[in-house]
Amino acid sequence: MSQEYTLTELMVVAAARELEDGKGILVGTGMPLAAALLAKRTHTPDLLLVFEAGAVGPIKMPRLPISVGETITCHRAVQASSMDDVMGAAARGMIEYGFLGGAQIDMYGNLNTTVIGDYNAPKARFPGSGGANDIGSLCRKTIVIMKHEKHRFVPKNDFITTPGYLDGPGGRERAGLPEGGPYKVVSTLGVMGFDPDSKRMRIDKTYPTSTIELIKESTGFELLLADKVTQVKPPTKKELTILRTKVDPLGHIAGLKSKK
């Protein structure tokens, strides 16, 4: 297609396409929320939006909220409860998807959003868990959105903030976590999934601007390959129009209005 799009828009569209209708999603602000709202307006009209701060099922929001606790998340919502209620619902298995980000991720989908380097004398310190540990522990499928670089996709995290599959097959079960775990990683280079047997990260899809070789070179551990690695199709005119005029008309998402 001739219509231009940004890498951010491609990532939002790729993440939106991974969502199924009739499910609940614990969603954060920025790209995750844009992806969820785009999915609702395209192929998942019955996707139930759940916010960490307590809002459940807003029917229509006039703009993207600046945080998961902004009052606009309750606009025409079916429920305005609390974090305790939301995490309790996730613990009862009622929320299918969770969206997460991270500073580091390893081959089993464990995430670090706490420190880089030694915990007591770190090179960098981040906000920490917030609700990320609960989301990764309790939601059935977690989708990670993050920049794809070798120092972010690492053999071993400096700190595990949010559990993925921990040390591999059976790791979550041994830790007493419910069934579930990492589902997809939507990065700046492609879409990764996880092998159902080894629980290791694999390449599922490349972008029109990336290759399997580039993804491997940008990863600090050995990636597996899906039986058939496909390419993410560029955003359609409909998806871009909805994203730009209905989901985020003010262009608050970084890079949304820049050219590809």
Image: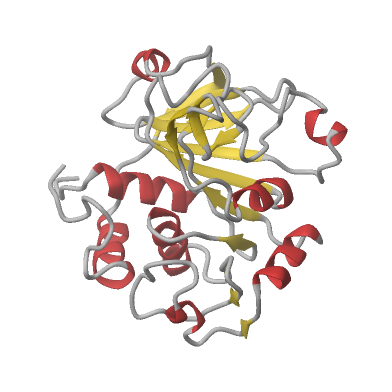
Q: Position of residue 81 (x, y in %)?
A: 65, 80
Q: 12 left or right of 25?
A: left
Q: 20 left or right of 245?
A: right
Q: Residue at x 26, y 29 (%)?
A: 209
Farthest residue in the bottom direction?
76
Farthest residue in the front direction?
121
Q: Nearer the viewer, residue 167 or 120?
A: 120
Q: Position of residue 178 (x, y in %)?
A: 82, 46
Q: 27 left or right of 205?
A: right
**Is 13 rendered above or below residue 95?**
above
Quadrant of the drawing holding the N terminus: top left
**Is 170 rendered above or below residue 138?**
above
Q: Nearer the viewer, residue 56 or 240?
A: 56
Q: Position of residue 70 (x, y in %)?
A: 44, 75
Quadrant of res 20: bottom right
Quadrant of res 54: bottom right
Query: What is the count of numbered marks?
Result: 0
Q: Residue at x 29, y 46 (%)?
A: 8
**Is 64 rendered above or below residue 140?**
below
Quadrant of the drawing holding the C terminus: top left
